């Protein structure tokens, strides 16, 4: 059964189609503003939902128990979202919407998402959803702290030329992610598996990455090495600053450059049994490490 709503419909009231198990397809009005609580709850034959860009509000439980729903698409204008909108929707494979909608989906079959809107906020993907590919729209300019934190299934993402801010820890614990970057992005560079900004700050390192040793990177940001697969790391000369919690907890062995001038007291906060080779003098290390709050078991200064 297919239903076509006339253009005069601007609101779908609470429970309007609740339990309509024969409903397979619905075409909504381009003037639609709100979809009420439980409006489509239990529409078990409904396989896809496309909401017009005019929609501003989704009520609680609006698509709950739509057990055949596999695809969900909205515009970027949704401002208000009720609770449990996707409860019992375990067949969803694809969502195109804002991060505030996408994060509510906990489908074991959700593999691909497309983000709309000018920003991607923290925890944008539900940990229960094994998303492998995330697409960022040309509207997106900011990727916030922990936006994709702990998305261990995430494998593919492209940063567009329009992204101007990637916050620390945005890709924290995404061990399988392969990131690509539009070559026309004027703010960021991707080289040797490292993404860094025009100020020389390393935002994130992926896989078996290597910091460029040409002086283009001078600072290691918080969470930059949260995806590093090895327990050891040699940091090249030219790095002057390492921020707090920069490294994954499994990392143990570090070679630090003599160029290092600022070392956050919490730089190795998540690491244990830390062993350091410092290319500088003992005096320089004493000044750097005076406030370190970590379990360093061995330090060798090479006095360069």
Image: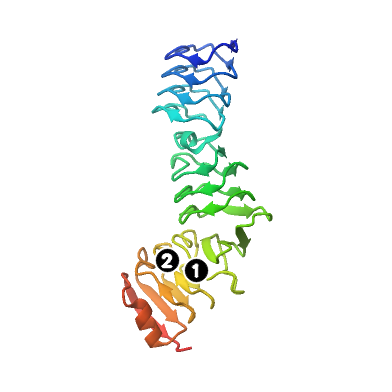
| Label 2 residue SS | loop
In front here: 153 or 10?
A: 10
Q: Residue at x 49, y 71 (%)?
A: 233
Quadrant position of residue 30: top right
Q: Residue at x 48, y 54 (%)?
A: 167
Asked whether 284 or 199 is in front, the reply is: 199
Q: Is residue 41 above or below residue 89?
A: above
| Mark 2 → mark 1, Cα distance in angstroms | 8 Å
Left or right side of 5 for 122:
left
* Disc ID at residue 219: 1
Q: Which residue is mark 2?
A: 243
| 231 up-or-down from 173: above or below | below
Find numbered disc 1 in the image and state the secondary structure of the residue it sits on: strand
Mark 2–mark 1 contact, CB under 8 Å? yes
Q: Taking 139 as reference, is 14 above or below it? A: above
Residue 182: mark in rendering: none
In the picture, measured across the screen, residue 295 lies left or right of residue 100, that is left
Q: Is residue 158 left or right of residue 148?
A: right
- State the image coordinates of residue 194 (x, y, percent, origin top left): 57, 62
The quarter of the picture where the N terminus appears is top right
């Amino acid at each position: 059964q297919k239903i076509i709503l006339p253009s005069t419909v601007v609101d779908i009231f609470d429970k309007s189609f609740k339990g309509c198990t024969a409903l397979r397809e619905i075409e909504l009005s381009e003037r639609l503003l709100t979809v009420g609580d439980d409006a489509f709850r239990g529409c078990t034959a409904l396989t896809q939902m496309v909401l017009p860009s005019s929609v501003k509000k989704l009520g609680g439980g609006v698509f709950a128990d739509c057990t055949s729903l596999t695809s969900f698409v909205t515009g970027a204008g949704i401002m208000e979202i009720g609770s449990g909108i996707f409860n019992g929707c375990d067949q969803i494979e694809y969502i195109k919407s804002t991060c505030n909608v996408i994060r509510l989906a906990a489908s074991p079959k959700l593999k691909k998402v497309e983000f709309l809107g000018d920003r991607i906020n923290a925890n944008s993907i539900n940990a229960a959803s094994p998303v492998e590919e995330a697409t960022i729209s040309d509207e997106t300019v900011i990727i916030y702290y922990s936006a994709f934190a702990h998305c261990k299934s995430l494998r593919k993402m492209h940063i567009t030329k329009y992204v101007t801010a990637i916050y620390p820890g945005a890709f924290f614990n995404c061990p399988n992610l392969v990131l690509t970057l539009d070559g026309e992005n004027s703010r960021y560079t991707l080289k040797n598996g490292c993404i860094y900004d025009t100020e020389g700050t390393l935002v994130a390192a992926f896989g078996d990455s290597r910091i460029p040793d040409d002086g283009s990177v001078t600072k290691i940001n918080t969470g930059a090495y949260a995806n590093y697969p090895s327990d050891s790391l040699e940091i090249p000369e030219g790095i002057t600053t390492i921020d707090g919690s920069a490294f994954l907890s499994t990392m143990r062995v570090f070679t630090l450059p003599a160029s290092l001038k600022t070392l956050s007291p919490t730089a190795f906060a998540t690491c244990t049994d830390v062993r350091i080779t410092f290319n500088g003098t003992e005096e320089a290390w004493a000044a750097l490490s005076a406030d370190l709050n970590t379990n360093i078991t061995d330090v060798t200064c090479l006095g360069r």
